Image (tube, rainbow, N blue to C red):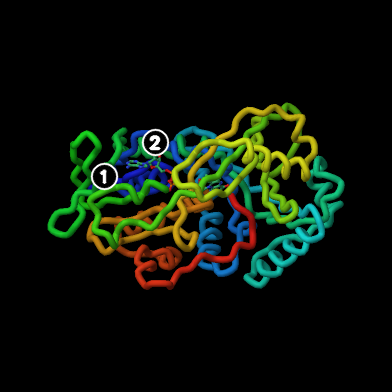
Amino acid sequence: MDIVIIGAGVIGLATAWRAAARGAAVTLVDPEPASGASSVAAGMLTPVSELTYGEEPLLRLGLASRERYGAFIAELEELTGHDTGYRGDGILEVAFDSDDLGYLDDLRRFQESLGIRVEALTGRECRKAEPMLAPGVRGGLLAPEDGSVDPRRLAPALLAAAGRLGVRLVRRRAAAVIVENDAAAGVRLDDGSEIRAAKVLLAAGPWSGDVEGLPPGVVPPVRPVKGQVIRLRTRVPFLRRATRGLVRGSSVYLVPRADGEIVIGATQEELGFDTRVTAGGVWELLRDARELLPGVTELEFTEVSAGLRPGSPDNAPVMGPTALPGFFLGTGHFRNGILLAPVSADVLTEVLLDGTVPEVGRPFAPGRFDAAGANGPKTRVGGAS
Ligand code: FAD
């Protein structure tokens, strides 16, 4: 069966790999594979710390993906020989002042009401877990089953895995979906050439709304949400595991890598397709990181970058078949696409190859936005990735 996937970010790549493993003939179209949000993201794997009221189906999807992560990575690393920087040793979330602690207490009660295991830690216990934390840190939560992966290693590993299984990569921009007899029939590229296929999956992240040729009700409702991150480097042990913090209501996180890199993120800005990095963004991140870990100012500054999260109207992915036969969506993963890559790939592979939507994927059907007003924005509890 011929499938064309538009977009080789983590979602398109993981789906291409999984579908090819089941014997599908897959073509990936992307002028610059793995260049979108997947090249900027910090890579926290945290369905728990990111919990938001009203997002329980997203939580279930995140937990299902976290459960799959270890086996997904083991298979990927064995097939390709790539190291993805995966670690499943938990995420610590700490509170800077008593208001921040009250907020974390609320979050813990909400998590526990959903049966999720988190450990409440005192300030002293937080510093025992992370000795570089500021003496004033009031307390925290440990989500022992969360973890992190390096998206800059994950995406190339997925690309290599897809290649090993015969996925064809076409380094061009998809300009339009070809529609014939009221069904998708392939993709027209920016040089005018065509790739014919029985099924087309649009997984172009925040650019998914730009591909032409689609009937109006089928165009995915995604928008770019800018996030700036900075990268530092340490030569001495500094941070043992990914640590999030609330500092006077503002959220910041630090994700350490085995090679000494520390990623600090992330701003959340509604500025369209703007990827300029700003002095204010860097200042905000360093200001909050320094409150939690005063030693960060001693570390080497190596990079600042901005990426665009693919946001949907209800902050959740848009995955599955559409009203146009043969045309499918795999986008809208917003701040969780790295976490959600394994489960999304499984859902989309089943949708594409078997024509059925697995239970865990049903709440994310593209058609859910059709009923006016059914999906307003949700109130956030946790911070941004
Ligand atoms: P992208 O990674 O954006 O990939 C889209 C691809 O489509 C690109 O390669 C692009 O070249 C291609 N493309 C675009 N238009 C076309 C076209 N017309 N034709 C062909 N190809 C096209 N998630 C987490 O789980 N944990 C985190 O800690 C985390 N931190 C983040 C921090 C920041 C600052 C940002 C920005 C994001 C973060 N995310 C995180 C979110 C995550 O990065 C995204 O949800 C995920 O990368 C989305 O993957 P994607 O494949 O849908 O899109």
Residue 302 image point, x, y percent? 63, 28
Q: Earlier in the sequence, mark 1 or mark 2?
A: 1
Residue 287 lies left or right of residue 86; in this view the side is: right
Q: Which residue is rendered at x = 86% and y = 52% of the image? A: 124
Q: 71 or 17, which lies in front? A: 17
Q: Which mark is residue 33?
A: 2
Residue in the picture at 66% in, 32% down: 232
Q: Of helix, strand and loop, which one carries label 1?
A: strand
Between the residue at mark 1 and the residue at mark 2, the CA separation in whole angstroms equals: 19 Å
Residue in the picture at 70% in, 39% down: 286
Q: Is residue 236 left or right of residue 188?
A: right
Residue 94 is at least partly visible in this image: yes
**In this rendering, does residue 79 appear at all?**
no
- Which kind of residue does numbered mark 1 sit on? Ala
Q: Which residue is mark 1?
A: 25
Rendered location of residue 194, percent (x, y): 18, 40
User: Mark 1, residues whose alpha carbon is within 10 Å: few (<14), some, or many (≥20)?
Assistant: some
